[in-house]
Amino acid sequence: EREDDCFQRSFAIILSLALPHSLRASSTLTTTSSSSYRLSFTPSSRRMSSFVTAADLKLDPFTFRQFDDPSYSGTKLSSVSKEEFMKGAVEAAVKEPLRDGYAPFCKHIFIPNFIQGAKVGAIEIAGNESKLKSGYKARTEKELPVLMRWFDKEDIETPDAKYLDLILYSKDQITKESGAMNSTVDDSEYSWGIISVKGQLENFETPMTPMTMLRNSLGKDEGGSGVPLDRVKYMESVAYWKTHASIV
């Protein structure tokens, strides 16, 4: 190589190594007809897919119980219609990045709470032990009841949520689970279904309940996702939920 060629190549390599990792992974070093070197960039799919569009999102029927079921254990959304919710949720969600969930098909988007009266879905038990209740509950008629514990909303003061955690499942996962439970499969065009909305004080993921993790490990036929039980994640869940309980 000529001395100027060596210099140009060395400069391009040094420049590429100085780039952030996300850009470095999408850069290419090419040789032009004049033997000079050019560093070009192709936006990576990971970076391009970190935000959703309005067309990507759909409200999954599994979420309807939060609007319609007075006995739902968690954040209730009955103060707005499903259409009003989706309008506000989509407007906020397209501005926030997707965050990874417990499996590749699960994502989260955290948005400011825009629903009047939306409360957090769980609180700490300390100081309210005498009001804690337990029993066997199923989320749908097709699922097996599991042992749960909760507070009745009439018995405690529940804070308003600061954030809403939009929990998303991919269309492919929703289709698989719907088929396994002999439920209607939606063939409309979308990428992510909102399968749950959690009111929170935090803008990051809090652990799912141990019973939800166990149900998931049972497989799609029993209403779970089919993701095997992760012992470390399970113990993290126990550490959180032994001091918290849902609100009904």
Image (cartoon, grey):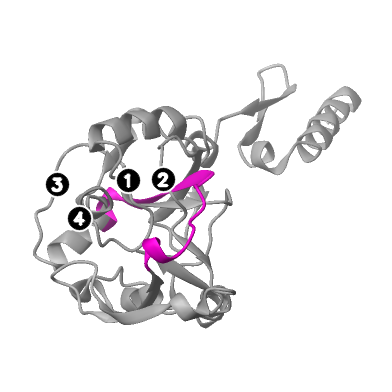
Which residue type carries mark 2? Ala
Element assignment for label 3:
loop
Q: According to the image, label 1 marks what residue? A: 77
Viewer-side residue, 222 vs 42:
222
Estimate how packed mark 1 is, as few (under 14), some (14 to 19) or many (20 or more) residues with alpha carbons within 10 Å. many
Total marks shown come to 4
| Disc nearer the start of the sequence (1/2) | 1
Query: Quick check: is 145 in the magenta stretch?
Result: no
Residue numbers of the magenta segment: 152-173
Mark 3 is on which residue type? Asp
The mark nearer the N terminus, 4 or 2, is 2
Left or right for 156, reference 184: right
Q: Position of residue 136 (x, y in %)?
A: 27, 81
Is residue 114 something one can see in this rendering? yes
Q: Say which of marks 3 and 2 sits in front.
A: 2
Question: Looking at the rendering, in which quadrant would you find the N terminus?
Answer: top right
Are dots 1 and 2 in contact, CB under 8 Å?
Answer: yes
Q: Is residue 31 above or below residue 242?
A: above
**Residue topped by disc 2:** 118
Q: Tag on residue 175?
A: 4
Vertical arrangement, residue 102 with respect to residue 75, above or below: below
Numbered mark located on residue 186 in the image:
3
Name the residue type under label 4. Thr
Q: Residues within 10 Å of mark 2 (few under 14, many from 20)?
A: many
